[in-house]
Image: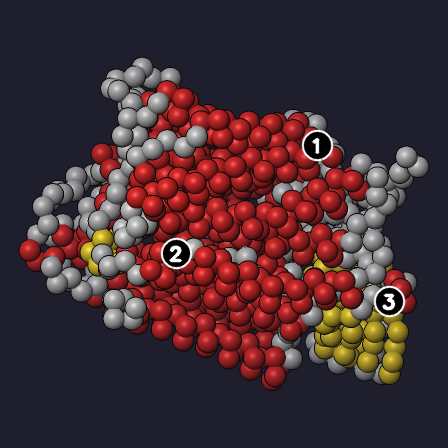
Amino acid sequence: MQVSKTFKRIIFLELAIPVALLTIGIYHGLMQTIYRAGVLRDVSFLKLDYYQGLTLHGVINAIVLTTFFAVAFGHVTIAFYFKKEPNKKLMWLGFWLKVTGTAMAAWAMLAGKASVLYTFYPPLKAHPLFYLGAALLIVGSWVPLFDWARMYTSWKKENPTTKTPLAVLGTLINFIIWFVCTLAVAYEVLVLLIPWSMGWTKGVNVNLARTLFWFFGHALVYFWLLPAYVMFYTVLPKVAGGKLYSDLAGRIALFLFLLFSIPVGVHHQYSDPTITQGVKFFHGLLTYGVAIPSFITAFTLAASLEYAGRKNGGKGLLGWMKRLPYFDKTRFLFPYFICGLILFVFGGVTGIINASYSLNSVVHNTAWMPGHFHMTIAGPVFLAIIGMSLYLYSNMSGKKIFMLNVATIIPYLWMIGMLVFSFGMSWGGLRGEPRRTNLGTTYLNPESPLYRSDWVPTTMLALFGGIIMFIAGMLFLVVFFGTILRKKSVEGKLEIPVSEAYHDEKRIPIFDRFKPWIVTMIIVLLLAYVPALLNVNKNSGPKAPPYNIDNPVPVVTGKK
Amino acid sequence: MGEVNIKSADEPEMKNFFPSGAITFFIFLVILSLAFWYGIYFLMIERI
Amino acid sequence: MTMVMDKVERGIIISSLILVSLFVFSLLYAKNRYKADVPECLPYDKAYTEPKVNKLDEKTYQVFAVAAMWQFQPSEIYIPVGSDVDFYLTSKDVVHGFNIAQKNVNMMAVYGAINKTTVKFDKPGVYEIVCHEYCGVGHQNMAAQVIVNYPDAK
């Protein structure tokens, strides 16, 4: 599909800015494994301190990169399937809101005024511009949904009996989930935190802030995951040389995500006070509900790959696994997808454990937790983002990929590093190793009374894995920026592989309409969250004043 | 590293595709889930 | 709709539902048989904001644990072997964690809220309490101990 210069420029910026920020984001990932292994036994390195680096790592990799990419990939998906470009003014509006917000938050973090981690739990206080920046980034990401909804409505009028393309369905569902869940964090940031951080209000109900954050926080991971799922369902089968086993399975999975992505947030608060065991258990059950679409996906993708492998001559029960384009550089997206999916097997299984109510006490806030989520967001999501960013940029700019051979093996290097890292973190977590902690100064410092020798092997594994991933990440940056610096060799175009379905079931209206699902989602949300909020209200005591990270004495706010 | 031969037209033998391999993979996934889950479960019980 | 859905996919959905039901059953069984549960919910009461160790009888103790930047109070808790201990937890300032890994104690200490869990210390030893939620620059220094010994030992 031919696209305008403006469209190309916007997509290029949406993709390239976060990838550029990955220089900082990935650097700080490596640094953490170095501090945690006790190789570095200090509070800071090169003027950046540990918790500042941890904040930068989380915000850049998990909030900025993922949000910009979801928007960019949404734009290209909608444009490609509807053969129409979204409204340019709105594309620019969303883009500038996101960039401005990111710049504000980046300044606050780099200036050391927002070392509060990406969850920014009060009463630790950040600079108001950090919160405001986050709010702008989120509001900027709302803009595209409304334009795409307009485009979808007019497409539907012209195509009343055609199934909505699966990729479009996934994009719209993803952003509906995003819009609803971000309302809670927008309220937390704009109403509770910004006035409090400016000294206009005296105290904040910490329990309420946390509950609002996690209303957002779990759905956030599906906002990260769904663009990758769209690729797995609609791009991967084609790239693998086969077909999607069942189109309907994809639709069912997506609608189940719409229902169950948000009303499960309390599973991040199993260890919190003020919320009753009953509400926590209910959220646990709902979380098992949101595991179902991932099981459907695991099977459907395996069946799709089996189809491709058999079509390519694979015989026997598992022979098809060998007949897939693992190292075919003309289909380099395949490695990015398959390595992500292999990691996701372990990421998903550990996720189910985390969600399992009382089992959570074994793993909560230990190193197991980042062990889990690096096998999900830093596994399939990250690899899909960077692979597709490279693919889209190369096609739309008309530039050949720089070092394509290297680009093809980067996912394997990343996957190996990740398996080593997550094994170390998970094992360490089971030995009581905490997350979010600069272990090098105390727990991994033999001179310290807190020294824990049993965390040495586990942190060393994480370090080793971290180094391998750092190398893979840096190689990717070389490939990506090397491609940007190349000269155009053909006319740029927008192209995305589109998979056919083996079972291309006829259109079933209930799996092609939003209203009944959105209504049900709201009902489930009310059932899940009204009791939780009532609990918080009933069991909370006084509100908390703000604290800077370096002072047990709260920030004194004078009369204004 | 081997290059994969892609057949562009649909082969007749793919008409009655039954995903036996995917079912096998799914069984493996279930077994893995059970192993990890009950591993943590018994660890929890032991610590109580 | 069920006629349109592939039989195998339908089987997959049913298998997944059975798998998670198995987990639910096991969790309920563990709750009943071993009292495996998440922390108990209490309404706020400022009585719990003063650190204390209360001995209710020879084998029953209460600990009012208060987390603050960057220490736990009390920081050394002496408990005789075989005792049941109720830990009540709150924070004086920011959010802290309270993790006794060897005894499955895992709670968040939050200002304006009281958390509670019960533990039986049936083996002697030193049990580390670690803060596992980032709480500012002193976070990695924040730890305490429960020292469990035989009552006649010194």
* Mark 3 element type: loop
Q: Chain of mark 2?
A: A
Chain under numbered label 1: A
- In the image, residue A31 lies at what x, y percent? 58, 36
Name the quadrant containing residue A385: top left
| Lateral position of residue A271 relative to residue B13, left or right | right
The chain that hosts pointer 3 is C
Residue sitting farthest toward the right: A559
**Residue A70, percent from left and from top:** 45, 40
Contact check, label 3 and label 1, Cβ < 8 Å: no
Q: Could you say where residue A2 lies in the image, as x and y percent from the top left?
A: 28, 26
Please give the residue where the numbered disc 2 appears in the rendered image: A513
Q: Secondary structure at mark 2?
A: loop
Disc 3 versus disc 2: distance between alpha carbons?
Answer: 49 Å
Q: Is residue C129 above or below residue A461?
A: below
The nearer-to-camera label among 3 and 1 is 1
Which residue is labeled 1 in the image? A129
* Number of marks in picture: 3
